[in-house]
Amino acid sequence: MPALVDLPISIDRDATLKLHRQLFDQIRGLIMNGMLQPGIKLPPSRALGQQLNLSRSSVNLALDQLVAEGYLNSKQGSGFFVDADFLSPTPLSPAQTPKRAYKFSRLTKDINQQRRFWPSHRAAFSPGVPDLENFPFNTWSRLVAQANRRRNLNAFCNADTQGMPELRVAIAEHLVSARGVRCLPEQVMILSGAQQALRLIAQLLADGGDSIAIENPAYPGAKAAFLAQGLDINSVTVDQEGLNVQELEALDKAIRFVCVTPTHQFPLGVTLSLPRRMELLSWAREKDAWIVEDDYDSDFRFKGPSLTALQGLDDDERVIYVGSFSKTLFPGLRLAYLVAPQELIEPLTQMRRALDGSPSTVAQSALAEFIADGHFARHLRKMKSLYGQRQDYFTAQLENRLSGFLTILPSDTGMHLATALSPKAASRWNDVDLAVKLNEIGVSTPALSTLYETSNKCVGGLLFGFAAAKEKEMDQALTKIEQLFAD
Protein backbone atom coordinates (compact mmCIF):
# COMPACT_ATOMS: atom_id res chain seq x y z
CA MET A 1 0.00 0.00 0.00
CA PRO A 2 1.48 3.40 -0.93
CA ALA A 3 2.63 5.83 1.71
CA LEU A 4 0.63 8.88 2.65
CA VAL A 5 2.21 12.10 1.45
CA ASP A 6 0.65 14.36 4.11
CA LEU A 7 -1.02 13.71 7.46
CA PRO A 8 -3.60 16.10 9.00
CA ILE A 9 -1.37 16.95 11.94
CA SER A 10 -0.76 20.33 13.57
CA ILE A 11 2.04 20.97 16.07
CA ASP A 12 1.63 23.74 18.67
CA ARG A 13 5.08 25.02 19.62
CA ASP A 14 3.68 27.19 22.43
CA ALA A 15 2.05 24.25 24.20
CA THR A 16 3.59 22.76 27.32
CA LEU A 17 3.22 19.22 25.87
CA LYS A 18 6.48 18.10 24.26
CA LEU A 19 6.64 18.05 20.46
CA HIS A 20 7.17 14.30 20.08
CA ARG A 21 4.26 13.65 22.43
CA GLN A 22 1.98 15.88 20.35
CA LEU A 23 2.95 13.92 17.25
CA PHE A 24 2.40 10.59 19.03
CA ASP A 25 -1.05 11.63 20.29
CA GLN A 26 -2.24 12.83 16.89
CA ILE A 27 -1.04 9.79 14.92
CA ARG A 28 -2.62 7.51 17.53
CA GLY A 29 -5.85 9.48 17.22
CA LEU A 30 -5.86 9.04 13.44
CA ILE A 31 -5.42 5.31 13.89
CA MET A 32 -8.08 5.04 16.59
CA ASN A 33 -10.73 6.91 14.58
CA GLY A 34 -10.05 4.86 11.43
CA MET A 35 -8.49 7.59 9.28
CA LEU A 36 -5.31 5.53 9.15
CA GLN A 37 -6.37 2.00 8.17
CA PRO A 38 -4.48 -1.19 9.14
CA GLY A 39 -1.59 -1.89 6.79
CA ILE A 40 -1.16 1.65 5.49
CA LYS A 41 2.38 2.98 5.35
CA LEU A 42 3.31 6.25 7.03
CA PRO A 43 5.52 8.85 5.34
CA PRO A 44 9.26 8.41 5.97
CA SER A 45 10.49 10.05 9.14
CA ARG A 46 12.56 12.59 7.15
CA ALA A 47 9.51 13.63 5.06
CA LEU A 48 7.30 13.75 8.16
CA GLY A 49 9.86 15.94 9.91
CA GLN A 50 10.04 18.31 6.94
CA GLN A 51 6.23 18.50 6.70
CA LEU A 52 5.87 19.41 10.38
CA ASN A 53 9.18 21.26 10.80
CA LEU A 54 10.29 18.74 13.42
CA SER A 55 13.69 17.21 14.01
CA ARG A 56 14.13 13.56 13.00
CA SER A 57 14.83 12.72 16.64
CA SER A 58 11.39 14.04 17.70
CA VAL A 59 9.71 12.16 14.86
CA ASN A 60 11.55 8.92 15.68
CA LEU A 61 10.69 9.23 19.37
CA ALA A 62 6.99 9.41 18.47
CA LEU A 63 7.15 6.57 15.94
CA ASP A 64 9.13 4.31 18.27
CA GLN A 65 6.56 4.90 21.02
CA LEU A 66 3.74 3.99 18.60
CA VAL A 67 5.57 0.77 17.74
CA ALA A 68 6.16 -0.04 21.42
CA GLU A 69 2.43 0.36 22.18
CA GLY A 70 1.32 -1.78 19.22
CA TYR A 71 -0.14 0.84 16.89
CA LEU A 72 2.62 0.58 14.25
CA ASN A 73 4.94 -2.07 12.87
CA SER A 74 8.46 -1.23 11.75
CA LYS A 75 9.94 -3.15 8.82
CA GLN A 76 13.68 -2.85 8.33
CA GLY A 77 14.32 -0.78 5.25
CA SER A 78 10.61 -0.38 4.48
CA GLY A 79 9.40 2.12 7.07
CA PHE A 80 6.46 2.24 9.46
CA PHE A 81 3.04 0.65 8.85
CA VAL A 82 -0.20 0.70 10.82
CA ASP A 83 -0.45 -2.71 12.49
CA ALA A 84 -2.37 -4.98 10.12
CA ASP A 85 -4.16 -6.68 13.03
CA PHE A 86 -5.25 -3.44 14.71
CA LEU A 87 -9.00 -3.16 15.16
CA SER A 88 -10.10 0.40 15.78
CA PRO A 89 -13.20 0.75 17.94
CA THR A 90 -16.41 1.40 16.04
CA PRO A 91 -17.52 4.92 16.94
CA LEU A 92 -21.03 5.18 18.35
CA SER A 93 -23.48 7.87 17.33
CA PRO A 94 -24.70 10.14 20.15
CA ALA A 95 -28.00 8.24 20.11
CA GLN A 96 -26.15 4.93 20.52
CA THR A 97 -23.83 6.10 23.30
CA PRO A 98 -25.04 4.45 26.52
CA LYS A 99 -25.25 6.45 29.72
CA ARG A 100 -23.01 4.96 32.36
CA ALA A 101 -24.84 4.21 35.57
CA TYR A 102 -22.30 4.97 38.26
CA LYS A 103 -22.97 3.37 41.61
CA PHE A 104 -21.59 5.31 44.54
CA SER A 105 -21.53 4.48 48.21
CA ARG A 106 -24.05 5.97 50.62
CA LEU A 107 -21.14 7.79 52.26
CA THR A 108 -20.36 9.56 48.96
CA LYS A 109 -23.94 10.75 48.67
CA ASP A 110 -24.04 11.91 52.29
CA ILE A 111 -20.78 13.86 52.00
CA ASN A 112 -21.81 15.42 48.68
CA GLN A 113 -25.04 16.54 50.34
CA GLN A 114 -23.00 18.17 53.12
CA ARG A 115 -20.80 20.13 50.70
CA ARG A 116 -23.48 20.93 48.10
CA PHE A 117 -23.99 24.55 49.07
CA TRP A 118 -20.46 25.35 50.25
CA PRO A 119 -19.13 28.02 47.84
CA SER A 120 -15.71 28.78 46.41
CA HIS A 121 -12.85 29.74 48.73
CA ARG A 122 -11.58 32.28 46.22
CA ALA A 123 -14.44 34.76 46.43
CA ALA A 124 -15.14 37.62 48.83
CA PHE A 125 -16.46 36.68 52.30
CA SER A 126 -15.32 33.03 52.14
CA PRO A 127 -15.54 31.80 55.78
CA GLY A 128 -12.39 30.57 57.49
CA VAL A 129 -9.92 32.00 54.97
CA PRO A 130 -7.05 33.94 56.64
CA ASP A 131 -5.32 37.03 55.29
CA LEU A 132 -2.22 35.66 53.56
CA GLU A 133 -0.79 38.97 52.38
CA ASN A 134 0.31 39.74 55.94
CA PHE A 135 1.95 36.39 56.61
CA PRO A 136 5.77 36.66 56.98
CA PHE A 137 6.61 34.34 54.09
CA ASN A 138 10.22 35.56 53.91
CA THR A 139 10.81 34.46 57.49
CA TRP A 140 8.98 31.20 56.86
CA SER A 141 11.04 30.46 53.72
CA ARG A 142 14.26 31.05 55.64
CA LEU A 143 13.20 28.64 58.39
CA VAL A 144 12.20 26.00 55.83
CA ALA A 145 15.60 26.36 54.13
CA GLN A 146 17.35 25.99 57.48
CA ALA A 147 15.28 22.89 58.25
CA ASN A 148 16.27 21.37 54.92
CA ARG A 149 19.96 22.00 55.58
CA ARG A 150 20.13 20.60 59.09
CA ARG A 151 17.93 17.49 58.76
CA ASN A 152 19.96 14.29 58.57
CA LEU A 153 19.02 11.46 56.21
CA ASN A 154 17.45 9.43 59.00
CA ALA A 155 15.04 12.27 59.80
CA PHE A 156 13.92 12.36 56.18
CA CYS A 157 13.17 8.63 56.25
CA ASN A 158 11.85 7.89 59.73
CA ALA A 159 9.54 10.52 61.18
CA ASP A 160 8.15 10.24 64.70
CA THR A 161 4.52 9.09 64.27
CA GLN A 162 3.41 11.30 67.14
CA GLY A 163 5.21 14.32 65.65
CA MET A 164 8.60 15.96 66.08
CA PRO A 165 9.41 16.38 69.80
CA GLU A 166 10.53 20.01 69.42
CA LEU A 167 7.23 20.97 67.74
CA ARG A 168 5.20 19.17 70.41
CA VAL A 169 7.10 21.10 73.08
CA ALA A 170 6.44 24.42 71.30
CA ILE A 171 2.72 23.67 70.88
CA ALA A 172 2.30 22.54 74.48
CA GLU A 173 3.95 25.71 75.79
CA HIS A 174 1.71 27.89 73.61
CA LEU A 175 -1.49 26.07 74.62
CA VAL A 176 -0.71 26.22 78.33
CA SER A 177 -0.02 29.97 78.28
CA ALA A 178 -2.53 31.15 75.64
CA ARG A 179 -5.45 28.73 75.93
CA GLY A 180 -5.25 27.40 79.48
CA VAL A 181 -4.89 23.82 78.22
CA ARG A 182 -3.48 21.31 80.69
CA CYS A 183 -0.94 19.27 78.81
CA LEU A 184 2.58 17.98 78.50
CA PRO A 185 4.42 17.56 75.16
CA GLU A 186 3.87 13.81 75.53
CA GLN A 187 0.11 14.39 75.15
CA VAL A 188 0.41 16.25 71.84
CA MET A 189 0.11 14.55 68.43
CA ILE A 190 0.82 16.33 65.12
CA LEU A 191 -1.52 15.62 62.21
CA SER A 192 -2.15 16.75 58.63
CA GLY A 193 -5.38 18.60 59.37
CA ALA A 194 -8.15 18.97 61.92
CA GLN A 195 -10.44 16.63 60.00
CA GLN A 196 -7.79 13.94 60.10
CA ALA A 197 -7.66 14.43 63.86
CA LEU A 198 -11.45 14.07 64.13
CA ARG A 199 -11.49 10.95 62.00
CA LEU A 200 -8.60 9.38 63.93
CA ILE A 201 -10.45 10.03 67.20
CA ALA A 202 -13.60 8.48 65.75
CA GLN A 203 -11.66 5.43 64.59
CA LEU A 204 -10.18 5.00 68.06
CA LEU A 205 -13.31 5.51 70.16
CA ALA A 206 -16.23 4.19 68.09
CA ASP A 207 -17.24 1.40 65.74
CA GLY A 208 -19.53 1.73 62.76
CA GLY A 209 -23.09 2.17 63.99
CA ASP A 210 -22.09 3.57 67.38
CA SER A 211 -23.85 6.77 68.44
CA ILE A 212 -22.14 10.14 68.79
CA ALA A 213 -23.45 13.70 69.13
CA ILE A 214 -22.60 16.94 67.34
CA GLU A 215 -23.91 20.49 67.51
CA ASN A 216 -26.85 21.65 65.42
CA PRO A 217 -25.87 23.60 63.33
CA ALA A 218 -22.34 22.28 62.83
CA TYR A 219 -19.27 22.46 60.60
CA PRO A 220 -19.91 20.12 57.62
CA GLY A 221 -16.30 18.91 57.64
CA ALA A 222 -16.69 17.48 61.15
CA LYS A 223 -19.85 15.68 60.18
CA ALA A 224 -18.15 14.30 57.06
CA ALA A 225 -15.29 12.92 59.18
CA PHE A 226 -17.77 11.03 61.38
CA LEU A 227 -19.89 9.89 58.44
CA ALA A 228 -16.74 8.34 57.00
CA GLN A 229 -16.54 6.13 60.07
CA GLY A 230 -20.16 5.03 59.64
CA LEU A 231 -21.31 6.52 62.95
CA ASP A 232 -24.87 7.23 64.06
CA ILE A 233 -24.82 11.03 64.31
CA ASN A 234 -27.22 12.76 66.70
CA SER A 235 -27.62 16.53 66.42
CA VAL A 236 -28.10 18.62 69.57
CA THR A 237 -29.52 22.15 69.45
CA VAL A 238 -27.31 25.20 69.98
CA ASP A 239 -28.90 28.27 71.60
CA GLN A 240 -27.59 31.55 73.05
CA GLU A 241 -25.55 29.65 75.67
CA GLY A 242 -24.14 27.06 73.30
CA LEU A 243 -24.88 23.34 73.20
CA ASN A 244 -28.10 22.41 75.00
CA VAL A 245 -26.74 19.86 77.46
CA GLN A 246 -30.19 18.88 78.74
CA GLU A 247 -31.12 17.85 75.20
CA LEU A 248 -27.90 15.82 75.04
CA GLU A 249 -28.74 14.12 78.35
CA ALA A 250 -32.22 13.27 77.06
CA LEU A 251 -30.86 11.20 74.16
CA ASP A 252 -31.94 7.61 74.73
CA LYS A 253 -28.68 6.22 73.36
CA ALA A 254 -25.21 5.31 74.56
CA ILE A 255 -23.27 8.28 73.18
CA ARG A 256 -19.57 7.46 72.71
CA PHE A 257 -18.50 11.11 72.37
CA VAL A 258 -19.81 14.58 71.61
CA CYS A 259 -17.96 17.04 69.35
CA VAL A 260 -18.29 20.72 70.31
CA THR A 261 -16.85 24.14 69.43
CA PRO A 262 -17.27 25.75 72.88
CA THR A 263 -15.22 28.93 72.60
CA HIS A 264 -16.57 30.06 69.22
CA GLN A 265 -19.40 27.86 68.03
CA PHE A 266 -19.40 27.19 64.33
CA PRO A 267 -21.29 28.70 62.63
CA LEU A 268 -23.39 30.79 65.06
CA GLY A 269 -20.44 32.27 66.97
CA VAL A 270 -21.87 31.85 70.50
CA THR A 271 -19.73 30.81 73.47
CA LEU A 272 -20.62 27.83 75.64
CA SER A 273 -21.51 29.37 79.00
CA LEU A 274 -19.66 28.33 82.16
CA PRO A 275 -22.73 26.55 83.66
CA ARG A 276 -23.15 24.60 80.41
CA ARG A 277 -19.44 23.71 80.39
CA MET A 278 -19.70 22.26 83.88
CA GLU A 279 -22.89 20.39 82.92
CA LEU A 280 -21.17 18.94 79.86
CA LEU A 281 -18.17 17.74 81.88
CA SER A 282 -20.52 16.16 84.44
CA TRP A 283 -22.44 14.45 81.62
CA ALA A 284 -19.24 12.93 80.21
CA ARG A 285 -18.22 11.65 83.63
CA GLU A 286 -21.64 10.16 84.41
CA LYS A 287 -22.07 8.56 80.97
CA ASP A 288 -18.46 7.41 80.68
CA ALA A 289 -18.26 9.35 77.42
CA TRP A 290 -15.70 11.59 75.74
CA ILE A 291 -15.78 15.23 74.65
CA VAL A 292 -13.98 16.34 71.47
CA GLU A 293 -13.21 20.08 71.67
CA ASP A 294 -12.63 21.63 68.24
CA ASP A 295 -10.87 24.94 69.01
CA TYR A 296 -10.52 26.09 65.43
CA ASP A 297 -10.07 29.91 65.62
CA SER A 298 -10.38 31.11 69.22
CA ASP A 299 -6.88 32.68 69.15
CA PHE A 300 -8.68 35.64 67.59
CA ARG A 301 -10.75 37.03 70.46
CA PHE A 302 -11.23 40.79 70.05
CA LYS A 303 -12.80 41.91 73.33
CA GLY A 304 -11.72 40.87 76.81
CA PRO A 305 -9.17 38.21 77.79
CA SER A 306 -8.88 34.88 76.01
CA LEU A 307 -11.23 32.25 77.39
CA THR A 308 -9.86 29.10 78.99
CA ALA A 309 -10.36 26.03 76.83
CA LEU A 310 -12.93 23.50 77.98
CA GLN A 311 -10.06 21.04 78.32
CA GLY A 312 -8.51 23.31 80.96
CA LEU A 313 -11.59 22.78 83.19
CA ASP A 314 -11.53 19.00 82.84
CA ASP A 315 -10.43 17.25 86.07
CA ASP A 316 -11.47 13.80 84.85
CA GLU A 317 -9.49 13.66 81.55
CA ARG A 318 -12.56 13.33 79.38
CA VAL A 319 -11.72 16.05 76.82
CA ILE A 320 -9.67 15.56 73.63
CA TYR A 321 -8.56 18.96 72.33
CA VAL A 322 -8.12 19.60 68.57
CA GLY A 323 -6.41 22.64 67.03
CA SER A 324 -5.02 23.65 63.65
CA PHE A 325 -2.63 26.12 62.01
CA SER A 326 -4.78 26.47 58.88
CA LYS A 327 -6.41 29.66 60.14
CA THR A 328 -3.69 31.10 62.37
CA LEU A 329 -1.00 30.66 59.65
CA PHE A 330 -2.10 29.38 56.22
CA PRO A 331 -4.24 26.44 55.00
CA GLY A 332 -1.56 24.99 52.71
CA LEU A 333 0.67 24.24 55.70
CA ARG A 334 -1.53 21.19 56.45
CA LEU A 335 -0.48 20.88 60.09
CA ALA A 336 -2.86 20.37 63.00
CA TYR A 337 -2.64 18.76 66.43
CA LEU A 338 -4.60 17.07 69.12
CA VAL A 339 -4.07 16.91 72.87
CA ALA A 340 -5.30 13.68 74.42
CA PRO A 341 -5.29 12.17 77.92
CA GLN A 342 -2.17 10.10 78.55
CA GLU A 343 -4.09 6.81 78.37
CA LEU A 344 -5.15 7.53 74.77
CA ILE A 345 -1.82 8.62 73.30
CA GLU A 346 -0.32 5.15 72.81
CA PRO A 347 -3.39 3.63 71.10
CA LEU A 348 -3.76 6.80 69.00
CA THR A 349 -0.13 6.49 67.93
CA GLN A 350 -0.56 2.83 67.02
CA MET A 351 -3.69 3.65 65.01
CA ARG A 352 -1.90 6.51 63.25
CA ARG A 353 1.10 4.34 62.45
CA ALA A 354 -1.12 1.70 60.85
CA LEU A 355 -3.24 4.10 58.79
CA ASP A 356 -0.99 6.99 57.87
CA GLY A 357 2.34 8.15 59.22
CA SER A 358 3.52 11.67 59.93
CA PRO A 359 3.39 15.06 58.20
CA SER A 360 6.49 16.56 56.57
CA THR A 361 9.42 16.74 58.98
CA VAL A 362 10.67 19.86 57.18
CA ALA A 363 7.39 21.72 57.80
CA GLN A 364 7.30 20.52 61.41
CA SER A 365 10.88 21.64 62.04
CA ALA A 366 10.27 25.08 60.48
CA LEU A 367 7.07 25.53 62.50
CA ALA A 368 8.84 24.58 65.74
CA GLU A 369 11.41 27.33 65.09
CA PHE A 370 8.66 29.75 64.02
CA ILE A 371 6.93 29.30 67.39
CA ALA A 372 10.07 29.12 69.54
CA ASP A 373 11.55 32.30 68.01
CA GLY A 374 8.40 34.29 68.81
CA HIS A 375 7.23 34.74 65.19
CA PHE A 376 3.98 32.88 65.85
CA ALA A 377 3.01 35.03 68.83
CA ARG A 378 3.84 38.24 66.94
CA HIS A 379 1.84 37.11 63.93
CA LEU A 380 -1.16 36.26 66.12
CA ARG A 381 -1.07 39.70 67.75
CA LYS A 382 -0.85 41.41 64.36
CA MET A 383 -3.69 39.40 62.82
CA LYS A 384 -5.86 39.70 65.90
CA SER A 385 -5.65 43.49 65.61
CA LEU A 386 -6.26 43.43 61.85
CA TYR A 387 -9.21 41.02 62.05
CA GLY A 388 -10.75 43.04 64.86
CA GLN A 389 -10.62 46.18 62.69
CA ARG A 390 -12.12 44.31 59.75
CA GLN A 391 -14.91 42.87 61.88
CA ASP A 392 -15.78 46.37 63.13
CA TYR A 393 -15.76 47.78 59.59
CA PHE A 394 -17.83 44.94 58.17
CA THR A 395 -20.36 45.16 61.01
CA ALA A 396 -20.79 48.91 60.56
CA GLN A 397 -21.13 48.65 56.78
CA LEU A 398 -23.60 45.77 56.85
CA GLU A 399 -25.77 47.43 59.49
CA ASN A 400 -25.73 50.68 57.53
CA ARG A 401 -26.45 49.16 54.13
CA LEU A 402 -28.34 45.90 54.69
CA SER A 403 -29.97 46.14 58.12
CA GLY A 404 -33.41 45.80 56.55
CA PHE A 405 -32.46 42.42 55.13
CA LEU A 406 -29.82 40.87 57.42
CA THR A 407 -29.30 40.84 61.19
CA ILE A 408 -25.82 40.07 62.55
CA LEU A 409 -25.55 37.37 65.21
CA PRO A 410 -22.99 39.02 67.52
CA SER A 411 -19.63 37.41 68.28
CA ASP A 412 -16.34 38.74 69.70
CA THR A 413 -14.18 35.91 68.38
CA GLY A 414 -13.03 34.36 65.14
CA MET A 415 -12.91 35.10 61.43
CA HIS A 416 -16.57 35.03 60.41
CA LEU A 417 -19.98 36.34 61.40
CA ALA A 418 -23.35 34.68 60.93
CA THR A 419 -26.35 36.72 59.85
CA ALA A 420 -30.07 35.92 59.91
CA LEU A 421 -32.53 36.98 57.23
CA SER A 422 -34.92 39.62 58.53
CA PRO A 423 -38.63 38.66 58.53
CA LYS A 424 -39.14 40.86 55.47
CA ALA A 425 -36.28 39.23 53.60
CA ALA A 426 -37.23 35.71 54.71
CA SER A 427 -40.74 36.21 53.35
CA ARG A 428 -39.32 36.92 49.90
CA TRP A 429 -36.12 34.88 49.61
CA ASN A 430 -34.69 31.49 50.54
CA ASP A 431 -31.13 31.68 51.94
CA VAL A 432 -30.00 28.76 49.77
CA ASP A 433 -31.16 30.51 46.59
CA LEU A 434 -29.49 33.72 47.75
CA ALA A 435 -26.19 31.93 48.44
CA VAL A 436 -26.23 30.30 44.99
CA LYS A 437 -26.98 33.60 43.24
CA LEU A 438 -24.29 35.43 45.20
CA ASN A 439 -21.73 32.73 44.46
CA GLU A 440 -22.50 33.16 40.75
CA ILE A 441 -21.52 36.85 40.96
CA GLY A 442 -18.36 36.26 43.01
CA VAL A 443 -19.62 36.63 46.59
CA SER A 444 -18.95 33.57 48.74
CA THR A 445 -21.57 33.39 51.51
CA PRO A 446 -22.79 29.90 52.53
CA ALA A 447 -26.45 29.55 53.46
CA LEU A 448 -26.81 29.17 57.21
CA SER A 449 -29.77 26.81 56.94
CA THR A 450 -27.68 24.18 55.12
CA LEU A 451 -25.54 23.71 58.24
CA TYR A 452 -28.52 22.53 60.28
CA GLU A 453 -29.44 18.88 60.51
CA THR A 454 -33.17 19.48 60.97
CA SER A 455 -35.10 22.11 59.05
CA ASN A 456 -37.71 22.75 61.78
CA LYS A 457 -35.12 24.42 64.04
CA CYS A 458 -32.95 26.11 61.44
CA VAL A 459 -32.25 29.81 60.99
CA GLY A 460 -32.15 31.18 57.45
CA GLY A 461 -29.21 33.47 56.86
CA LEU A 462 -25.77 33.94 55.34
CA LEU A 463 -22.26 33.33 56.68
CA PHE A 464 -19.64 36.06 56.12
CA GLY A 465 -15.90 35.53 56.43
CA PHE A 466 -14.29 38.94 56.88
CA ALA A 467 -10.68 38.03 57.73
CA ALA A 468 -9.24 37.97 54.19
CA ALA A 469 -11.38 40.83 52.78
CA LYS A 470 -9.95 44.34 52.57
CA GLU A 471 -12.30 47.29 53.05
CA LYS A 472 -12.51 47.94 49.30
CA GLU A 473 -13.35 44.30 48.63
CA MET A 474 -16.02 44.35 51.33
CA ASP A 475 -17.56 47.48 49.81
CA GLN A 476 -17.65 45.95 46.34
CA ALA A 477 -19.17 42.69 47.58
CA LEU A 478 -21.76 44.46 49.74
CA THR A 479 -22.75 46.56 46.72
CA LYS A 480 -23.43 43.36 44.77
CA ILE A 481 -25.57 42.08 47.64
CA GLU A 482 -27.49 45.38 47.76
CA GLN A 483 -28.15 45.14 44.03
CA LEU A 484 -29.32 41.55 44.34
CA PHE A 485 -31.77 42.46 47.12
CA ALA A 486 -32.95 45.47 45.11
CA ASP A 487 -33.61 43.27 42.08
Image (tube, grey):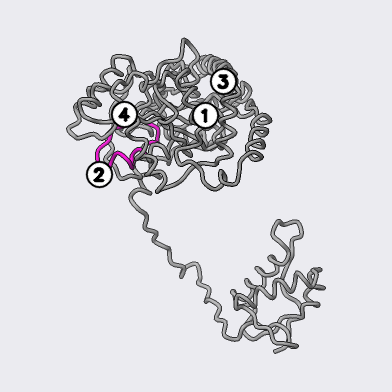
Identity of the amino acid at label 2? Gly
The residue carrying mark 3 is 377
| Picture layout, residue 50 above or below residue 133 | below
Quadrant including the N terminus: bottom right
Q: Residue furthest bottom?
A: 1
Disc 4 packing (10 Å; few <14; some 14–19; many ≥20): many
> Which residue in the protein does label 1 denote?
327
* Label 3: which secondary element: helix
Q: What residue type is labelled 3?
A: Ala
Q: Which of marks 3 and 4 is nearer the N terminus?
A: 4
Q: What stretch is highlighted in magenta?
A: 201-222
Quadrant hosting residue 209: top left
The reply to whether the C-beta atoms of the residues labelled 1 and 4 are less than 8 Å apart is no
Report the front residue among 73 and 449: 73
Q: In this view, does 418 lie to the left or right of 217?
A: right
Q: In this view, does 21 lie above or below 432?
A: below
- CB within 8 Å, label 3 to label 4: no
Residue at the disc numbered 4: 291
* Labelled disc at residue 209: 2
Query: How far across and how far down the image is residue 289, in percent?
Result: 25, 31
Tell me the amino acid under the disc marked 1: Lys
Asked whether the viewer can see residue 309, the reply is: yes
Q: Tell whether 275 sits left or right of 309.
A: left
Q: Which of marks 1 and 4 is nearer the N terminus?
A: 4
Earlier in the chain: of badge 2 and badge 3, it is 2
Q: Is residue 107 magenta?
A: no
Q: How crowded is mark 1: few (under 14 residues within 10 Å), some or many (20 or more)?
A: many
Distance from the alpha carbon under mark 3 to that under mark 1 = 14 Å
Q: What element carries label 1?
A: loop
